[in-house]
Image (tube, rainbow, N blue to C red):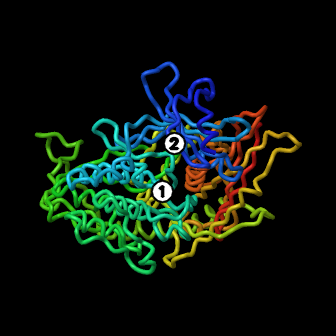
Amino acid sequence: MADFWQRCEGRVIEQKYPLNQYLGGTPSSGVFLTHRSGAPAEKAVIKFILAHPGTAKLHLSRWARAARLSHPNLLQLLDSGRCGLDGRDLLYVVVEYAEENLSQILPERALTPEETREMVVPVAEALIYLHGQGLAHGHLKPSNVHAIGEKIKLSVDSVTRLGKLHLARGADSYVAPELLSSPVTGASDVWSLGITVVEALTQHAPDVQTARHGDPEVPETLPQPFLDIARHALKRDPTQRWTAADIATHLKPGQAVKTEAPSVPAVSATPAKATEAKLSPLDVPLSPERGIPVAKLAAVPPRVMPPQQKLGAPAKKTMILPNYVIPLLAAIFVVAAIVVLPKFLRHQQEIPPSTGASSVQVQSETKPADHTRNQALPAPHPTVKDSARAAVEKAPPTSAAPAKLRTEIAPATQAARPSGDSPARGEVLEQVLPEAPAKALNTIHGVVRVTVRVHVDAAGNVSQAELEAPGPSRYFADLALKAAGKWIFGSPELEGRSVASEWLIRFDYSQSGVVATPQQTTP
């Protein structure tokens, strides 16, 4: 296979990426030096992997998502696509060019403690950003830690969603032990960073095979603070590991570390301004909980004069009501609620549909966002910070007894298809259900149905979502609109090219959970 990659030198991909020089590869992948069309001086790197039918569209959708990431310590993903070379079906991804990576330095020498600090801090900050976006790097190792001038940058072609199963790349010490049977988490990236720290200082990765049921042995010769970092990052139990923010704080004592709550792009989300405060080293615990600045603890909120009251204006007289007025009004309100509320609830009921689709059960908790009737998905990655509080305020009143949420979803393979034998058929690669709280579902008598129309681009991502049939409840319509915007589709193909499509997604809410039924409408 190496001969095949070398024979590809000089070829041009998609009439815009010449394969100038073969840099290396494996039997299933190859890396070449190229440059971007119209900018010969701007070098880039193009990487090829074999296109497997079961994972090709998933890789392309992940790369499309990674191209929208923006952080000074992440390599910029410039382009991606699918092509053929000598009868081989290949996927390619184009990223900015880096002069060297850490795996090229370590065979020659180990890093000094100061060099290690300069490497670990930007890597940890990049992980904080990814985890805040609801993503994980998934493949952190020295060969993916790059240097461009004075900047350290991580590769992004392996980025995946938190909670997804790890795509097998062979067992090695950089892969956290829990990934053999559990989804990817931020803690699995921290394990990989711990292995990389030990290797950077000793030129050897720690032996994790001899300690299969315990924590791997960390060399006592490691200088501080890296000895503490490695020990806390390489805990076999992922819940006991430090976070990326803990590691950055340990290397930058006395400085505030900006962290972001895990989030995913939402239809109605708007970025919130991040606030920073200087923290004393004693105020920052080495744990996942963030410290509270002393300045905030001691601050006394100033007295603010109501805006309608002007200085020098005479004070308004206050009306004094008799003692019996307030109880009387409360009694009238209670009687009105008893009479009106049952009629209002009956007005929202719908006859439950008969659904023959098979379903699976999952557990879910919610943080719904603001309602948007018809809004295109933003290209950047906004954060969702106050949506949980908004969901609590908007949720209908329910009984105090906790309810167990059972959410149902129609399998992607059972998604409805357009009639006829047309080859222009897409598929659902990733479904996201409305995160409706159990106490909200318990208020439903019958079924609340919401239908959302989504416009899907050629890469399989939702570019716009709008309510086709909002149903009787704005609250549940809001949740459905937000969930539909996160779906990922396999695009239909016409004449060998991926094309855009439209889908209708029907969400049926009931006390037993949520059922999603997708149907392709065009092409």
Asked whether residue 435 appears in the rendered view, the answer is no
Q: Classify mark 1: helix, strand or loop.
A: loop
Circle 1 residues within 10 Å: few <14, some 14–19, many ≥20: many
Task: Tell me, for residue 24, which label it has, or none.
Answer: 2
Horizontal side, residue 154 vs residue 369: left or right: left
Horizontal side, residue 6 vs residue 115: left or right: right
Question: Which three-letter amino acid code belongs to the residue tagged 1?
Answer: Gly
Which is more N-terminal, label 1 or label 2? 2
Q: Quadrant of the N terminus?
A: top right
Q: Count the marks.
A: 2
Gap in Å between the C-alphas at discs 2 and 1? 22 Å
Discs 2/1, front: 2
What residue lies at 50% left-to-right and 62% top-to-bottom? 184
Foreground pick, 77 / 219:
219
Q: Quadrant of residue 193?
A: bottom left
Horizontal side, residue 176 vs residue 107: left or right: right
Outermost residue toward the top? Answer: 38
Picture coordinates of residue 231 (x, y %)? 30, 70
Picture coordinates of residue 36 (x, y %)? 50, 25
Question: Which three-letter amino acid code belongs to the residue tagged 2?
Answer: Gly
Q: Classify mark 2: helix, strand or loop.
A: strand
Picture coordinates of residue 6 (x, y %)? 59, 36
Foreground pick, 320 / 260:
260
Q: Quadrant of residue 213?
A: bottom left
Asked whether residue 441 appears in the rendered view, the answer is yes
Residue 215 sits above or below residue 224 on the image? below
What residue lies at 47% left-to-right and 32% top-to-bottom? 44
Residue 58 sits above or below residue 147 on the image? below
The residue wearing badge 1 is 138
Q: Quadrant of the C terminus?
A: top right
Horizontal side, residue 315 vs residue 127: left or right: left
Foreground pick, 206 / 455:
206
